[in-house]
Image (cartoon, rainbow, N blue to C red):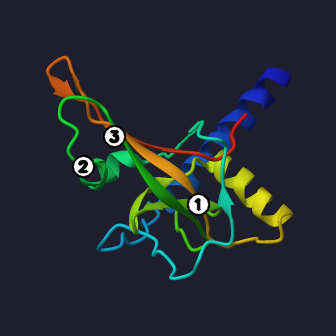
Amino acid sequence: MELAISLLIIAVTGLVVYAIIKTNPAKPMPLPARPATPYEPQLPDVAPALHWSDDGRFLVEVVNESRYQATLKALAGDHGDAPAATPYLATLVPDDVNPYESAAVAVFLNGRMTGYLSPKASLTLRALLKHKDIEGQVTSCDAQVRGGGVWQSGHLAYVVVLDIEQLEK
């Protein structure tokens, strides 16, 4: 008797689920419209509030440089087959309107966008800015464009490294 009741409950439940699915088919959610051009922050026309330094250690690497390889190649200048190590002054811009990362920090060299700090490094830098009472302000540090040397008949990618205290531990 109990087995018959259990089978009846399972059958009725199956019919109810089937009826719900047939009368309310899942409709795919529309994707948000993609912008016509990729998002890129603007470099504000303000002097940096602070210049960071880590005594020339250059331990912080900028991320997302693959998108900016042409820019980095131009910034690296002529370095032949040897890897570049071209010095620059980097401008670090908290990017509060970035549609992809709420705490992004953009990195500019010579007025040109070259990538971002990693999400973890961005949060650490923003905490340091807040601690120094310059939250949300533009800062600077020394930087180098490295790479581009020849290896196994091809050129290595370029990277940007920053002379700022290590932001990821």
Residue behind mark 1: 105
Q: Earlier in the sequence, mark 1 or mark 2?
A: 2
Left or right of 168 in this view: 81:
left
Q: Amino acid at mark 2?
A: Gly
Quarter of the image containing the C terminus?
A: top right
Q: Amino acid at mark 1?
A: Val
How many numbered badges does the structure rendering display? 3
User: Quick one: label 3, few (<14), some, or many (20+) residues within 10 Å?
Assistant: many
Mark whose residue sits in front, 2 or 3: 2
Callout 1: helix, strand or loop?
Answer: strand
Mark whose residue sits in front, 1 or 2: 2
Q: Are marks 2 and 3 in contact (CB under 8 Å)?
A: no
- Residue 85 in the image: above or below residue 7: below
User: Quick one: label 1, few (<14), some, or many (20+) residues within 10 Å?
Assistant: many
Q: Position of residue 132 (x, y in %)?
A: 83, 65
Left or right of 80 in this view: 17:
right
Whether residue 48 is visible: yes
Q: Position of residue 149 (x, y in %)?
A: 25, 30
Q: Which mark is residue 158?
A: 3
Whether residue 25 is visible: no
* Displayed quadrant of residue 35: bottom left
Q: Earlier in the sequence, mark 2 or mark 3?
A: 2
